[in-house]
Image (cartoon, rainbow, N blue to C red):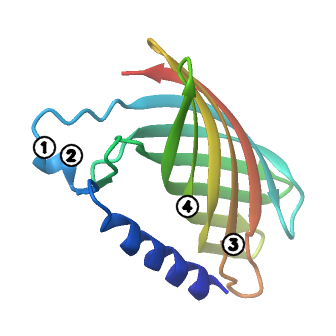
Amino acid sequence: MKKMVIAASLAALSVTVHAEGWRFAPGFTEQGFKFDPSLAATVNYVDPRNHSSDTGFGVDFNFNCGLIQDPQNRMRTHLQFGRISDSGLKANAFELSPRYTVPLRGGLSFGVGPSLAMYQVEMPGYDKSLYGIGLAAGINYRSGAWYFGADARYHDTQSKSGVNFDNLTLGAKAGINF
């Protein structure tokens, strides 16, 4: 199933990037390209399929994508780092999610895109890195120096030694724009 999702995503991306106006590596080749970064603290409700749900904390760093950009500069990349710890289960999360973002009004926007994740999962007798692919969607509000947002993310991870970390994450974030 994962291979089909990856193949479909790559096929859709290859067709899309050949559309007129899409640019490769604008962050490295265009003078004056603006990354417009935001940094936020996050609080997440993490609900793994085979474990009890828990609250996690982390950081979200997002910016205009410097690798691929559409004609209206609507691609934003989200890098998220998080940690959960519950009843012997500990997980460190690293997520990368490029999102196509649509401005709504008054600093409000909605974005959706694929997400890649790596989880360092620890529990009694088990300490492994699990990799996952998923989908992320979020609503963001940027006004002056302030940044607020909410996300929903789902990741399907591979299984190692009979353990996986498939999870649904709902998060809220608050931070600053640079």
Q: Is residue 8 left or right of residue 56?
A: left
Q: Earlier in the sequence, mark 1 or mark 3?
A: 1
* x and y percentages locating residue 99 in the rendered image: 50, 51
The residue most toward the front is 20
Query: Residue 22: image x %, image y %?
Result: 28, 56
Q: Residues within 10 Å of mark 3 (few under 14, many from 20)?
A: many
Residue under numbered circle 4:
115
1 or 3: mark nearer the eye: 1
C-alpha distance separating marks 4 and 1: 26 Å
Q: Are marks 4 and 1 in contact (CB under 8 Å)?
A: no
Please name whichever residue, 41 or 76, is drawn nearer the observer in this view of the structure: 76
Q: Secondary structure at mark 1?
A: loop
Disc on the earlier residue, 4 or 1: 1
> Which residue has dot 2 on it?
27
Amino acid beneath label 3 = Asp
Rendered view: 3 above or below 123:
below
Instruction: Say which residue appears at 73% left-offset and 69% top-offset.
Output: 165
**Identity of the residue furthest to the right in this view:** 52
Q: Please tell me which residue lies in front, 150 or 117.
A: 150
